[in-house]
Image (tube, rainbow, N blue to C red):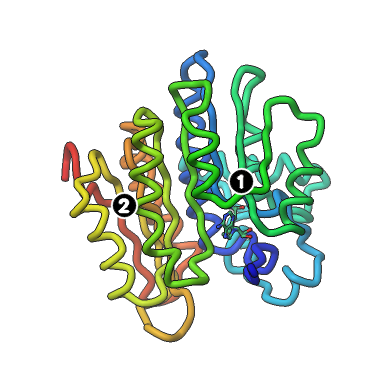
Amino acid sequence: MLSYRHSYHAGNFADVLKHIVQIAIIEYLKKKDKPFTVHDTHGGAGNYLIDSDHMQKTGEYRDGIERLWDKRTEVGVIDQYVKLVKQLNPVGKLREYPGSPSIAASLLREQDRLQCTELHSTDFELLHKRFAGDKRVRVEKLDAWQGIKAMMPPQHRRGMVLIDPSYELERDYRDVLPALQMAMERWATATYAIWYPVLDRNRTEHFVREFIKAEMPDLLRVELCVRPDASGRGMTGSGMLIINPPYTLAQHMAQAMPLLKEHLCDTGGHGMVKRLTGEGA
Ligand SMILES: C[S@@+](CC[C@H](N)C(=O)[O-])C[C@H]1O[C@@H](n2cnc3c(N)ncnc32)[C@H](O)[C@@H]1O
């Protein structure tokens, strides 16, 4: 029984970082005409209405997308992200926040493909309905890891995989690395982006160390903590581990980090862009 609903958290500071990284990777893939596939293991509902009870109940988007909505930063990856969210809100007011599948779909070209898995019945239905009729998009009601087995490798050699569990269960932390290894055996040429929360610093560092120990080639870590680390006081930050990142990503995220800190962090917040393995580590 899944209790996590992304509709309570959409557009929060963690989504901002995750979706900036996602857009930067897809934009890099688009530099060549050759088609690519985006695989989204934990798709969520696709789109989230700001006025919904869920979003209003937590108000998390106010400390995320809302803080960037009116900003023009002159930093490419941030401005691309804000522009994309604005395109989905043509009335000029933030009414809807796009989830990762909607972000990917709005960037795909005719030749590219998106495939998503989502297990929650309600969110699956919403996601499925959203893309009904879009021949570029495939949505399956499948466990994320089963989806990797069933849907990888996709038809294209180029692409990215977003792995975005809710980490509701301790098992979620343990499952990611073996699932990633299984995916990489099937599709070695893709870029993999794994989201993780910062709730407890020791837990987070243990999680990251496992990837270094597994000798993941070319591993980049990007993290933004909006508050000082404080175990037991909720999510203070989040990060992404990126395997096979575009060679431009570290530099682009390093440019973005000071501005993300300025706009999203409280006193004591901190950010990091660090190569953990590969060139420059
Ligand atoms: C953090 S949310 C995804 C948000 C989405 N990627 C985005 O950025 O908009 C995690 C999602 O994973 C789904 N989920 C949880 N366990 C799953 C599993 N084993 N397989 C597939 N989906 C799962 C949840 O229902 C939830 O919608």
- Disc 2, SS: strand
Q: Which mark is residue 117?
A: 1
Q: Viewer-proximal residue, 197 or 129?
A: 129
Q: Tell me what residue is drawn at x 17 percent, y 37 percent.
A: 279
Q: Viewer-proximal residue, 214 or 66?
A: 214
Q: What is the three-letter code of the residue carrying label 1?
A: Thr
Residue tagged 2 = 221
Against 26, is 127 above or below?
Answer: below
Q: Is residue 223 left or right of residue 31?
A: left
Residue 10 at x, y percent in the picture:
64, 61
Q: Quarter-wise, where is residue 233 in the image?
A: bottom left
Q: Tell me what residue is drawn at x 33 percent, y 68 percent.
A: 204
Q: Is residue 14 visible?
A: yes
Q: Quarter-wise, where is residue 175 in the image?
A: bottom left
Question: Which quadrant is the N terminus positioned in?
Answer: bottom right
Question: Which quadrant is the C terminus positioned in?
Answer: top left
Q: What is the three-letter code of the residue carrying label 2?
A: Arg
**Quadrant of picture, ligand 1:** bottom right
The reply to whether dot 2 and dot 1 touch (C-beta < 8 Å) is no
Crowding near the residue tagged with mark 2, few <14, some 14–19, many ≥20 C-alpha atoms within 10 Å: some
Q: Tell me what residue is drawn at x 76 percent, y 37 percent.
A: 131
Residue 246 at x, y percent in the picture:
36, 32
* Disc 1 residue: CB within 8 Å of ligand 1: yes
Q: Viewer-proximal residue, 262 or 180?
A: 180
For discs 2 and 1, the disc positioned in front in the rendered view: 1
